[in-house]
Amino acid sequence: MAEFVTVAKESDLSPGQSMCVIVKGRKVALFNVDGTVYAINDTCSHAEASLSEGELDGHVVTCPRHGARFDVRTGKALSLPAWAPVDTYEVKVENGEIKVAL
């Protein structure tokens, strides 16, 4: 069974926003898409860039370095120069806390 770790308060991440948190030594990007929180690896699979600093448009985040796009629901790379997906992580929100399992 996955172990969930509290990483932020629900009030820290409004719809349309993103943030980077550290979970067990890993950088994880959180995205709030219309009230649903998604978690993916914060590092672009193409280059060392923080996806949480990218522009979020619906379910798609654009890497701020070279413009690769990723679906925050699945981690799938949607455009070059990235071709490899990024890891996704299970998220749950309980009692106003965002929790992530690696």
Image (cartoon, rainbow, N blue to C red):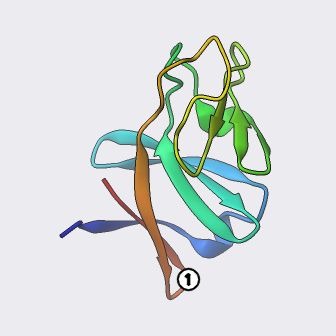
Residue 22 versus residue 70 in the image, above or below: below
Residue for badge 1: 96
Q: Where is residue 86 in the image (x, y as percent from the top left)?
A: 46, 33
Q: In which quarter of the image is residue 4?
A: bottom left
Give whichever of 85, 38 is nearer the camera.
85
Q: Farthest left residue? A: 1
Q: How many labels does the image show?
A: 1
In the figure, is residue 84 to the left or right of 1?
right
Q: Quadrant of the N terminus?
A: bottom left
Left or right of 60 in this view: 10: left
Q: Which amino acid does label 1 sit on?
A: Gly
Residue 38 place in picture, x, y as percent: 56, 57
Q: Please give the name of the residue rendered at 35% of the width and 40% of the height, measured from the top-left corner.
A: 26
Indicate the position of residue 93 as horizontal and vertical percent values. Answer: 51, 77
Q: Residue at x 75, y 65 (%)?
A: 14
Vertical comparison of 78 with 37: above or below: above
Question: Going 62% across and 49% down the picture, which residue do you hit?
Answer: 19
Give x and y (percent) for residue 23: 35, 50
Compared across the picture, whether 49 is left or right of 5 comes to right
The residue lying at 46 percent from left, 73 percent from top is 92
Task: For mark 1, give the secondary structure.
Answer: loop
Tag 1: Cα neighbours inside 10 Å, few (<14), some, or many (≥20)? few
Of 6 and 55, nearer the camera is 55
